[in-house]
Image (cartoon, rainbow, N blue to C red):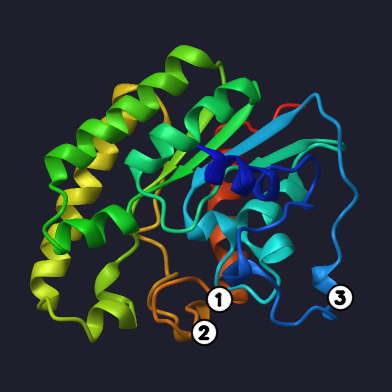
Amino acid sequence: MKRFLGMLALVICVGLAGCTSVGSAGTSTDPVASDCNPFPQGSGPYTYVAIGASDAVGIGATCPATQGYVPLLGQRMPAHARVVNLGISGATVRVALSDEVSYALAAKPNIVTVWLAANDFRAMENGTLTLATYTQQLDHLLGQLHAGTSAHVYVADLPDLTKLPYFIHGNVPLPIIAAQTVAWNAAIIAVTAKYSDILVDLYHTNLAPHPDYIWIDGFHPSTKGYAVLAGVFWAAMQAHGDPHA
């Protein structure tokens, strides 16, 4: 808990895009770039909360604190909106349940984004997690948000993992990755629908097939990829009448 509180001081911020990312891996590789300058901080009452992993932190962007999809969404929120980025690098749904959800509830959000699938998927590949367990944990997470907030919750699924270099050059044959991705997304869709939350469909976007949208690790989005990713989230929000000031 002490370790998490130390991380929390870094990842929670109030503002349009002034969040600070977690750890040295999330720091800017180009501190003089203009997009690294924090945006003016807001004080609410409109609040956007992001639950997620390294993608929420912005790993892969030149300046994660301003160019990740969370701060990019924050820039589009109503004036003076609060952005509470709870992303933790390496987080799974289990980690989010223990270390993110309670803070999300306390923030009294208007909008919540949840993108937690890739690390769990890799855990499944490593034999340390099953899809059934992941589905149960995601159900628990969304259930807590449903019971504890009146926020509109946007849940993202997996992109087409067969287009990512990380999996293309991995040990599991791509046809198996393809079938597993479809199965995982079906589970995500079902749990999201159970709570009348809104699916952010990444599987049918053109995010994964573009090499320039993917960072050098072959897994995380690049700066350009995060911009596209934020656009997909934003389009889903606008289609459902969000954000309401």
Residue 198 showing in the rendered view: no
Q: Residue at x 56, y 34 (%)?
A: 112
Q: Name the amino acid type tagged 3.
A: Ser
Q: Quadrant of residue 228?
A: bottom right
Secondary structure of the residue carrying tag 3 is: helix
Instruction: Name the residue: 54% across, 17% down.
Output: 149
Which of the two discs, 3 and 1, labels the residue nearer the N terminus?
3
Amino acid type assigned to the residue bearing label 1 in the image: Ser
User: Of the residues tagged 1 and 2, which is closer to the observer?
Assistant: 1
- Residue at label 1? 222
Q: Position of residue 220 (x, y in %)?
A: 46, 71
- SS for callout 2: helix
Query: Looking at the rendered structure, which numbered label has been put on residue 212?
Result: 2
Relative image position of residue 239 (x, y in whole percent)? 56, 39
Q: Residue at x 91, y 49 (%)?
A: 40
Q: Which mark is residue 34?
A: 3
State the separation of the CA atoms marked 1 and 2: 7 Å
Residue contact between numbered discs 3 and 1, judged by CB atoms under 8 Å: no
Counting other residues with Cα less than 10 Å from the Cα at mark 1, is it few (<14), some (14-19), or many (20 or more)? many
Q: Which mark is residue 177?
A: none
Tell me the distance, in whole angstroms, between the alpha carbons under discs 2 and 3. Answer: 21 Å
- Residue at x-position 54% and y-position 46%: 3
The three-letter amino acid code for the residue at tag 2 is: Asp
Q: Say left or right for 237 vs 44.
A: left
Asked if disc 1 and disc 2 are in contact, CB closer than 8 Å, the reply is yes
